[in-house]
Image (cartoon, rainbow, N blue to C red):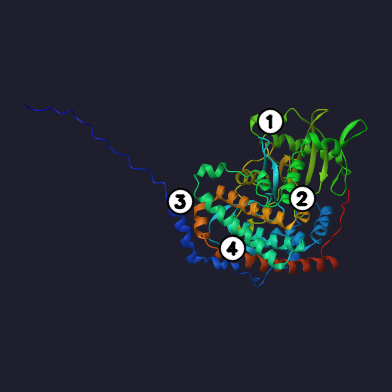
Amino acid sequence: MTTIRPKVESITREKPEALGPNAKQRMALGKALRERVPRASHAQWTPPSGRSDPAELLKHTDRGRVKELIPIRYARMRQSPFAFFRGAAALMASDLAQTPTTGIRVQACGDCHASNFGGFGSPERRLVFDINDFDETLRAPWEWDLKRLSTSVVLAGRQLGARERHCADAARLVARSYREHMREYASMRALDAWYSHLDAEILIDDAKTKESKKYWERLESKARLQTGEHVFPGITGVVNGRRRIIDHPPLVYHPRSAETIRKHVTEMFHRYRLTLPDERRVILDRYKIVDVARKVVGVGSVGTRCAVALLMADEHDPLFLQFKEALPSVLEPYAGKSRYANHGERVVTGQRMLQSASDVFLGWTSDGEGRSYYFRQLRDMKMRIDLDEMSQEEWIEYLEICGWALARGHARTGDAAKIAGYLGKNAKFDDAIEKFSVAYADQADRDYEVLVKAIRAGRLPARSYAAA
């Protein structure tokens, strides 16, 4: 008897798509980069021959800034070597371009220093910790951000009166935190790394002493009161029957041409509105601009066009928006031009890439003369970090989370596995960053003296107030 077997259709197996190297393989590729760029090579800093005169390079970066505000910039930079460093991102960018890099790029902050981190409110009203300045953001080597951050730690430590050994140890801590957390992100699923965030409460949870815990709790409580509703009575008043922002020159003031500026801002505002998603416009459209005042911010940003706009939905419902001019990134001459014609869009996009959560009113615009700007809320649950108020324990806790936050941002926008493979498990890279940071901090000290002499000689203007 013949058994009739059912006919089985042949199954054609599809070849799996070529997905490229997996995380383990990419870590191996990163490790292999050590042959071309030894980790110890990052310790090197020697001023290149023909290095630009710091004063002349700074004068070059004054182009396009509001002329009457430039003296405030140099007055602030004159306060200390760390203040100088904060305002001289263009000078360090030029120097970093001469240092070794692995060729792995990320969305770099571009001005990554110890004062450019902190807490702020997420759209879900969590208080999160992250990088908070993106004026110079651009695709660039990951090493540049880390070297600028670690150098700033040495300079800030010196300003705080820390011993030289402690300053070097702090720079090493930042490098170690970055290295160890980058390895953690390298092992995560891509979406898990993207969704990761740092709640500001981690500073409270990880506090080593009762005093530190109380310090971070106090800062968090203050930050939660930094909302439009809470700051409204303190920074506005009624003038001739109309609600106005209170002048606090030279930081906040109404220039003589205030009404002209208000009309100008209103036109910009309509263009900015179009860069927001429709659901954000719904809420923004409930507010109307009632006042605009010029604002002087930061150190390196002084001289850029910046203002605060007070908007009201009704007499008890304020919204404060800050808009700020966006100039080309200081990294552009060395990392390549931005893909965005509007530098406000470059800043906004870079911020959204690097931060785990960004302001719902973040958007960009331009004025009638082709200048780029970006808009965001003013001080929305901003955790004010004052380095001068920190104890040694609080300073160390803060720096550890800064290194963590930088690693998280770079892991979101670059190849975490390759970077982690290059960095490795031991402290060789940490050693190199420590040596570089001390050497470049010494360079910043020398450059600061050049600034002071240039101000004394009248080559650079410096005064602590602006003409209205």
Residue 391 figure quarter: bottom right
Q: Nearer the viewer, residue 291 or 232?
A: 232
In the picture as drawn, the residue positioned furthest to the left comes out as 1
Left or right, 466 with reference to 159: right
Instruction: Say which label, 4 or 1, has the lower sequence index.
Output: 1
- Provide the residue designation for mark 3: 23
Are circles 3 and 4 on residues that touch, CB within 8 Å? no
Q: What residue is shown with label 2?
A: 304
Counting residues from the start of the chain, the first of labels 1 and 2 encountered is 1
Label 1 – label 3 distance at C-alpha = 41 Å
Q: Amino acid at mark 3?
A: Ala
Q: CA distance from mark 4 to mark 1?
A: 47 Å
Q: Nearer the viewer, mark 3 or mark 4?
A: 4
Disc 4 designates what residue? 430
Q: Reading the chain from its start, which is encountered first: label 1 or label 3?
A: 3
Residue 17: image location, x then y, percent: 38, 43
Q: Do we see residue 141 in this rendering?
A: no
Q: Is residue 338 above or below residue 124?
A: below
Could you say where residue 411 lies in the image, as x and y percent from the top left?
Answer: 55, 50
Quadrant in the picture for residue 444: bottom right
Residue 281 disc label: 1
Give the mark toward the camera: 2 or 4.
4
